[in-house]
Image (cartoon, rainbow, N blue to C red):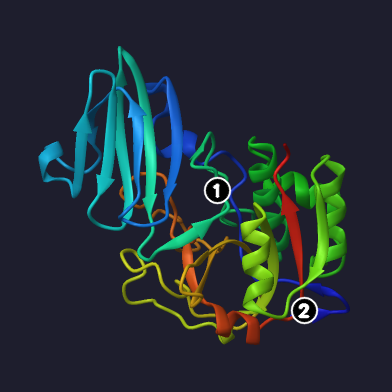
Amino acid sequence: MIKGKRFFALVFFVTIPIFFIFTGASLFDKQQFVTLSSTQQSFAVHGKVSSVRNYTDISAAPLTIKESANWSIITFNKSGYYGLNIDDNGIKIFYSVFVSPVPSVHADKHVEQINWYQSQFNSGTTSNCGPASCAMTISWAQEEYYPTSLVRKEIGWHGDGATSFEELIKVVQSKGVNAKILPLRTFDDIKNIIDSGSVAVVLFKTDGVSSNVKDPQSNFFNKHYVDNVGHYIVVKGYSKDGMYVIVHDPIPSDWTQNKFRHNDGISMLGQNRYFNASELLKSLRRADMLVVTRRL
């Protein structure tokens, strides 16, 4: 729905750090979050893999491990989400790993300290896709969780609750995070932003992007819902062939419990969705993007 320069979707958000709920954070000394650009990319951990979540035996998991005295180099044979338990001389570390289904570029650090995604579940209000997307970018930039509820509190509630780019950027900049509004017209505009190490909040009409409601749990392409509203999302990567942009979409898996989690036990259905770049660009409600740069 449009009201002046404000836009919203009838969706909800979660206001507490999701990674403390679903993995039993007290069981681990540290948690790390890894994004791999393809199945060809390996990553190294200090220590040994003690188990892989949802696999009774490590050998049954679709991965290859090369071990040295103190290090393990891990390569995944299949895209998706994985939860790895690492034993580093008695220190227990949990790694949530996302492996891209196609060669891609992401604005995530190779290893993140937090899961900066947020859904809009359970706010009890409407029109929070903008605040949720804004909160994600602040969390990503600061590497510290910042809740959607505080963004909404700072913006306030006006009429139907719709929010504008101008309201969102004011909140981001108030946290000392570098942000600016730039034109968005071509795929290269997005590519250049991601290549510079930034992410972007964009506003689009949801019915302009294809949906995948039959198998969104194992297939990361297209929206995981059917809707027809103005909606904010965070663009945080792209496929190397230029066909897709990779987004964090704050819409939850369902509106009553939002209970779905990927195999890592943490990640939600809206994380790392691959939208057709041409479809997204054609369905923009505003030919701009709110660009946020990580704090150095």
Q: Which residue is depicted at the point 69% across and 43% down? A: 141
Q: Relative to 103, does residue 43 appear above or below in the rendering? A: above
| Rendered location of residue 68, percent (x, y) | 23, 24
Earlier-in-chain disc, 1 versus 2? 1
**Residue 164 in the image: x percent, y percent?**
83, 67
Of 196 and 180, nearer the camera is 196
Tell me the mark number nearer the camera, choosing from 1 and 2. 1
The answer to whether residue 53 is above or below residue 271 is above
Please, what is the three-letter code of the amino acid marked with disc 1? Answer: Asp
Which residue is disc 2 drawn over?
286
Q: Is residue 261 above or below residue 83?
A: below
Image quarter of the C terminus: top right
Q: Which residue is drawn at 44% across and 24% down?
A: 30
Q: Residue 108 carries which label?
A: 1
Q: Which amino acid does label 2 sit on?
A: Arg
Quarter of the image with the N terminus in it:
bottom right
Looking at the image, residue 173 lies above or below residue 192? above
Q: Distance between the residues labelled 1 and 2?
A: 25 Å
Marker count (numbered) = 2
Residue drawn at (85%, 47%) of the image: 173
The single residue placed furthest to the top in the displayed view is 90
Q: Is residue 129 visible?
A: no
Q: Which residue is drawn at 49% across and 80% down?
A: 226
Q: Can residue 188 be seen in this view?
A: yes
- On screen, residue 47 versus residue 192, left or right, reads left
Residue 125's spot in the image, x, y percent? 69, 60
Task: Look at the numbered disc 1 and give the secondary structure of its residue.
Answer: loop
Q: Few, some or many C-alpha atoms within 10 Å of disc 2 (few <14, some 14-19, many ≥20)?
A: some
Does 265 sit left or right of 224 as displayed?
A: left
Q: Which mark is residue 128?
A: none
